[in-house]
Amino acid sequence: MSVAVYGEFQKDKSGLFFGLTGPKLAGLFVALMPCLLAVSRSDWGAVGWTLVLFAAAALVIAVPIRGRSSINWLATFVAHSAGSASKLTEFRSKAMEGENIEEADLPGLLKQVKVHDGPPEGPQQRRVGIIQNHANLTWAATAAITFPGIKLADVAERALLADGLRDLLNAAARTEMVEEILFIVRSVPDDGEERHQYLLEHLSAAAPAQARHVTEGLAQIVSQASVQTEAFCTVTVSEAALKKNAKHFGKGMAGRMSAMVMLLAEMETKLRSGLQMDTVRWLTSPELAVAVRTGFAPGDRAQLVAAGVAKSKDPKVNADVPWPMAGPSGAHSAARHYEHDAWWSSSDVIRLPGKGAVMGALAPVLMPQEAGERRSLLVGYPIMSFDKAQKLTRKKEATADMAEAINEKMGRKMRASERKQVGRTRRLDEKLDSGNAMVRPYALATVTVPRTMSIAEFSQRLHASIRNSGFAPLPVDLSQDHAFFASVVPLGLSLVNTKKLN
């Protein structure tokens, strides 16, 4: 049985000629006009300097630099420089300044996030934390998930899991509410705190000294060789879709909360059945605060685990993290890394290879190499609306037809990559017609280390892990803060503008 490979991804915009889109071709034509006018007047001196200007314009318009156009780089550089000059890229918590606040105090794009308590559900009357993003006009909820993994799964089991992921995305598209589904995995060397607390509770003081020594030594060895992972699944819904659906449950905030809870129950069924998740626990507001705090400060996890154990013995112990203390005390977004408290992080977009990707291929990216290092991985699935998908498919087919006609008329033979792109475009309409959703998957990896370590060194190690997995890394320079929020903090922040997909 052959290994199932996902290789049907393609560019959003297909080029008409030599990979160039219509606007780029128009820009090159406008840049060439002065040269053509100089030739028509036989002004050969002007032809020379206009050709130089055209070559410079062609470099800016047509040649990408590390996956981004020169215009995009220029706009990002100007925005980052302006933010640095005005100190907008720096953050200092209000608690550090002595202010007494009750709401969340988070840096950057997370300032627009507010967490509401949903209606009580289940025998324990848990109130799911509903995340509202005022800037993006979205609502979201995050679940802590546990998954047995696919490292030991055979080909048939991986194919079943792939079908389960497809069913999840198709079900999300059919709701006409879900904009995006995000999976975040954070992996750190095991701090051994749970094992330490277990030994404190179960290791008898009357046990022989040699037995105690062997047990404690084994615990230390196991901790050094272990890696601990925590995974989250976030479901994001647009305000417009939620408001429309909330009419069936009442008006205002209560209707929105009820509609979200009903949607989460539907998504949970797909996560447990298709993707075979062992547990799916939608996080409450205090649990979200803990997840945010450990995202910014991985070293705080051991203290929070110890506080949770103490609370199980004494209910008076406060093991929660207040939202004003969930974020960092200070943060700064540099060009190639993001500084937060005693840590700094560097992020890379993972470019999907043309040969395709096997499920589980990104596992090496999540393996930290030294104590204190944390790896985080975000895999996002923005879901395009059916009408937008149909419109895009028709446009891509027309572009493919035009590209073939232009190449044939010019006598230019299409390259293998271009032929594959055209073939994928032809098959796309059939997949949409069979009821499949159109998604735009992307992946983002982040490494976090203490400030005492070199972030440049560990950033290069992350690059090597991505390349060893068969992918290509693309550093998110000048946007490291946004990348960190999306790949580490499970509050539903996305890398794409989902408004353009609907």
Image (cartoon, rainbow, N blue to C red):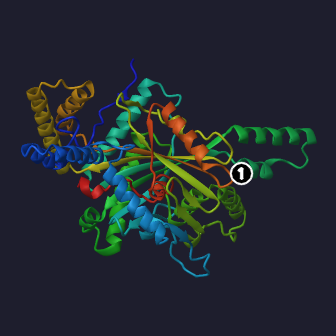
Horizontal placement of 480 versus 299: left or right? left
Give neighbour class at mark 1: few <14, some 14-19, many 20+ (Cα, 10 Å).
some
Residue positioned 66% across, 56% down in the render: 299
Q: Nearer the viewer, residue 80 or 168?
A: 80
Residue 98, position as x, y percentages in the image = 62, 81
Residue 209, position as x, y percentages in the image = 92, 42
Residue 109 appears in view: no
The residue carrying mark 1 is 193
Horizontal placement of 375 versus 198: left or right? left
Q: Is residue 91 above or below residue 454?
A: below
Question: Considering the image in quadrants, where does the N terminus appear?
Answer: top left
Residue 450, position as x, y percentages in the image = 65, 53
Q: Is residue 150 above or below residue 348?
A: above
Q: Nearer the viewer, residue 271 or 389?
A: 389
Residue 106, position as x, y percentages in the image = 51, 68
Q: Is residue 192 above or below residue 158?
A: below
Horizontal placement of 217 versus 15: left or right? right
Amino acid beneath label 1: Glu
Residue positioned 27% across, 53% down in the render: 175
Residue 209 appears in view: yes
